[in-house]
Image (tube, grey):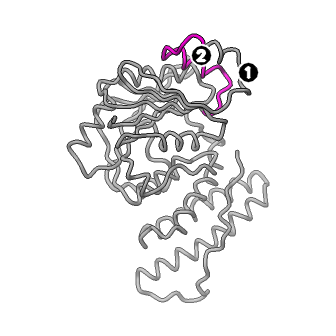
Amino acid sequence: MARISVVVPTCNKKDMVTEAIDSVFGQSFRDFELIIVDDGSTDGTPVQIFSTFGAQPQAIEELSRMHPTAVRPFSHPFLHDGIPVWYHYYPNRGLAAARNRGIRCSRGAYVAFLEAEDLWDGGHLLSHMRFHEGCHEAAVSHSAVDHVKERGRPRKARKDAPLSGWIFDRALEASPVRISAAMAHKLCFQECGVFDENLPACEDYDLWLRMSAHFPFYHVEGPLVRQRSARPQGARTWSWDRYRVYALEKAFQGGRLNPEQRLMVASEIVRKCEHLVEGFTHLKTEERASFYERKRKRFVLEVRKLRASQSGTPLVGQGAEPVAEECIVPASL
């Protein structure tokens, strides 16, 4: 049985995913299995994958003749360069669902993710495995990310600042780790769950929030992950705090945080709600602005209660009220 399960989700990125797969087979560490989860591609990805791994010509021809919408869910095993490969094709359900399917199919002790638009340097898996062999208590590791050229235009090279140890406080603001740079022991998913398939964005933020509350994250020095897609900036991302507030409320109400973590989460919800109220007010979307203003006020009270509880000072004034069940999944952007 392979020690690492490499999960590569993809949807309509046939050229990029082929390059990503090449970077997986370029690894110096060879004790892994590759799980490719195709989330309903309609751009010929199945044909390209079958051709890449040397499937029978009849199978390739049959896939080529099929209309993309006629392809039914299926799985197919390959053996490439001595490495077991599974290709799973499913109807489109989103990136979180594709990753979860990969996790459920995995047989390795560790799971490493690689997005179709990213690339691994050749020593990526070896660096992680050597670290875990020397630090048996480590459950989650991650490495640096280098942001490379996009659409032929040079981008300023930047390495993410390394975060190591108990990083829960850093995970509150935004996702602290690039998915393609992370490797986690299977027990982490058994303990903390998998990706939330209700989230159209920030599903990695939600997962790292849960995991960082229970496990330290370790930064591994060594080869980089090369990220080929730019993260959205500016006006396109401020409203993503809707999804982060949803994740924070889940954590707050989940009963698995200690009092200090609950205070940190409640305080972060207040900050993010302030940001959302400001943004939606600017857009003159009063209904959403009012929704997050009500939520902000409730969590201001929660912050007061938690601080009073930790200091031993009784809360004077407004009585304690339970957090209302208004933790809805925001609509897609």
Q: Earlier in the sequence, mark 2 or mark 1?
A: 2
Which region shows up in magenta?
39-58
* SS under mark 2: helix
Q: Nearer the viewer, mark 2 or mark 1?
A: 2
Magenta stretch: includes residue 110: no
Residue at x-position 31% and y-position 26% = 30
Queried whether the magenta region covers residue 52, the answer comes back as: yes
Looking at the picture, tell me which residue is in the foreground, 295 or 182. 182
Query: Mark 1 Cα within 10 Å, few/some/many (few <14, many 20+)?
Result: few
Residue type, mark 1 in image: His
Residue 89: which disc? Answer: none
Left or right of 8 in this view: 286: right
Residue at image x 33%, y 32%?
125
Give the distance between the C-alpha atoms of the residues marked 2 and 1, in whole angstroms.
14 Å
| Direction from residue 171 to residue 109 in the image, left or right | left
Quadrant placement of the C terminus: top right
Helix, strand or loop at label 1? It is loop
In the displayed structure image, the side of residue 91 where residue 231 appears, left or right: left
Q: Do the residues under discs 2 and 1 have CB atoms within 8 angstroms?
A: no
Residue under numbered circle 2? 59
Three-letter amino acid code of the residue under disc 2: Ala
Q: Residue at x 53, y 27 (%)?
A: 76
Residue sitting farthest toward the left? 134
Q: Is residue 269 above or below residue 80?
A: below
Across and down, in percent, residue 194 comes to 50, 50
Residue 302 higher or lower than 128, as above or below: below
Residue assigned mark 1: 67
